[in-house]
Image: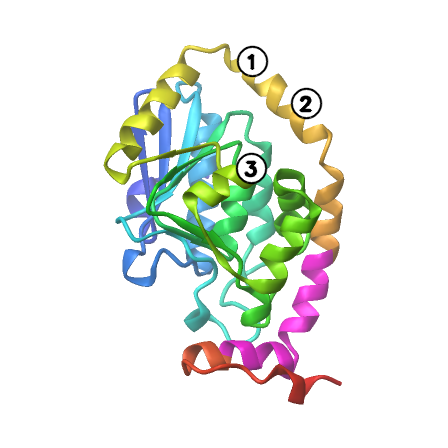
Amino acid sequence: MMIDPTTFEDVIYEKRGRAAWIIINRPQLYNAFRAQTIEELIMGFKLAADDKGVSSVVLTGAGDKAFCTGGDQSAHEGQYDGRGIVGLPIDELQSIIRDIPKPVIARINGFAIGGGNVFATLCDLSIAADTAKLGQVGPKVGSVDAGWGTAMLARHVGDKKAREIWYLNLQYTAQEAMEMGLVNKVVPAAELDAAVDEWTTTLGERSPTALALAKRSFNADSDNIRGISMLSLNAVKLFYDTEESKEGVRAFTEKRKPDFHKYVK
């Protein structure tokens, strides 16, 4: 099937030199994703993977407010609105970020929260604007991205810190994220594109095969997490159908604190 990125509604696909830029284009919703967004992101990564002229991929969000803030809570009550285990093929997107034989750079231009934080965790490299905020919200909204979101995060920041991030749902500055190992570099917001371009230019001068082999070797050491992630995703599917999980979505949309405990069985 031929992929035509000009037909995308939620994602912008651009080539800048030897870099493919994949941009979540839902700034009015802080670049939260629905099923269609995930489908278009997958297609964008497939385009970049097949293009021999592409040496690296930049994943980012439109505007200056958000990189990605995870799943669009208005797009589901329980399951999401598309295909896949939980109504969106999030596992396929997470896998292709890992499996594409090219470095993927997270250009973190604002909030990287929830599923957006997991994307940043999965990318090979991360450059953040000094205005960016990173964190997790899963337990606040009746959700969890166990596997890549938990175990891979612990690889980056350490087990204790990963548990803090997931249990307390605090937000961290870009500087704090860099100090804990979640971000490689922090620059002033006005210099973010120049910093990303510098890295994509450098990657364009490197051997594509050597980069692919290096990425495969890094991934091999942590690929057991893929199995944890798939097991957890199937468990989350069952969790999403409970009143406890649905209470998180309702509370978020009604802008109130959830009362999870009255639904615990």
- Name the residue tied to disc 2: 217
Q: Earlier in the sequence, mark 2 or mark 3?
A: 3
Q: CA distance from mark 1 to mark 3?
A: 27 Å
Residue depicted at x 47% and y 11%: 206
Mark 2: few, some, or many residues within 10 Å (few <14, many ≥20)? few
Q: Nearer the viewer, residue 72 or 165?
A: 165
- Name the residue tied to disc 3: 181
The amino acid beneath tag 3 is Gly
The answer to if 236 sits in the magenta stretch is yes
Residue depicted at x 60% and y 68%: 139
Residues at circles 2 and 3 in contact by the CB criterion of under 8 Å = no
Counting from the top left corner in percent of width and height, residue 213 is at 62, 17
Region in magenta: 232-249
Counting from the top left corner in percent of width and height, residue 257 is at 49, 81
Residue depicted at x 63% and y 80%: 244
Counting from the top left corner in percent of width and height, residue 146 is at 67, 56
The amino acid beneath tag 1 is Thr
Q: Secondary structure at mark 1?
A: helix
Per the picture, the main secondary structure of the magenta-coloured stretch is helix
Q: Is residue 64 left or right of residue 200?
A: left
Residue 86 seen by the camera: no
- Vertical comparison of 163 with 265: above or below: above
- Name the residue tied to disc 1: 209
Q: Secondary structure at mark 3?
A: loop
